């Protein structure tokens, strides 16, 4: 048999609510990935939804196992920390790679690379 039958009703309701809310947020992020028009706007929906969904689902897991085993399980805390740390870095790297690609291909609507401030100052003083 399963140990989940030992879970009190109040904890089961909380866990189910958190899991459903986390799954709904992840679904909204996936739909945003499909519906948004260009690559740059598509980056934001899944990254924000991933972080929010993972936090809620891991919180549900923490509540479930804290009630069942009478101790805190820190595996979920590590998962949340790593997702929160790596998701923005991945977003930034993907955005920078796409921006570099668009600049090389000279696509319209892409801002040009700006000169560093030191070069602008040295050009102004040479004149």
Image (cartoon, rainbow, N blue to C red):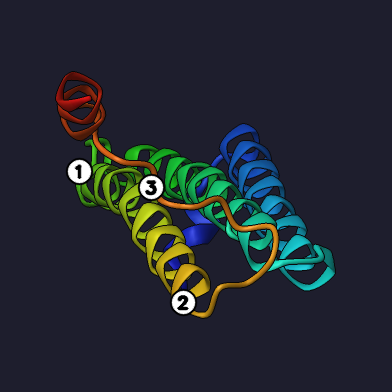
Is residue 64 shown above or below 123? below
Horizontal arrangement in the rendering, residue 99 relative to residue 35 (left or right): left
Q: Which mark is residue 1?
A: 2
Q: Which mark is residue 98?
A: none
Which of the two marks, 1 or 2, is nearer to us in this view? 1
**Circle 2 crowding by C-alpha within 10 Å: few under 14, some 14–19, many from 20:** few
Q: Along the line of sight, which residue is nearer the eye, 87 or 78?
A: 87
Residue carrying label 1 = 74
In depth, the one of 30 and 42 nearer the eye is 42
How far apart marks 1 and 2 lie (CA) works out to 25 Å
Residue at (63% x, 32% y) in the render: 10
Residue assigned mark 3: 88
**Mark 3 or 1, nearer chain start:** 1
In the displayed structure image, the side of residue 49 where residue 72 appears, left or right: left
Q: Is residue 70 shown left or right of residue 13?
A: left
* Mark 2 or mark 3: whose residue is earlier in sequence: 2
Q: Residue at x 68, y 40 (%)?
A: 13
Q: Name the secondary structure under disc 3.
A: helix
């Amino acid at each position: 048999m399963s140990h989940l039958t030992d879970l009190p009703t109040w904890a089961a309701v909380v866990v189910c609510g958190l899991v459903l809310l986390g799954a709904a947020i992840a679904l909204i992020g996936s739909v945003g990935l499909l519906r948004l028009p260009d690559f740059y706007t598509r980056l934001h929906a899944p990254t924000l939804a991933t972080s929010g969904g993972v936090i809620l689902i891991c919180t549900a897991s923490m509540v479930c196992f804290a009630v069942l085993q009478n101790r805190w399980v820190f595996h979920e805390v590590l998962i949340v920390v790593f997702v929160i740390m790596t998701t923005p870095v991945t977003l930034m790297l993907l955005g920078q790679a796409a921006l570099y690609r668009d600049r090389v291909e000279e696509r319209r609507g892409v801002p040009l690379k700006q000169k560093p401030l030191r070069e602008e100052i040295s050009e102004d003083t040479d004149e």
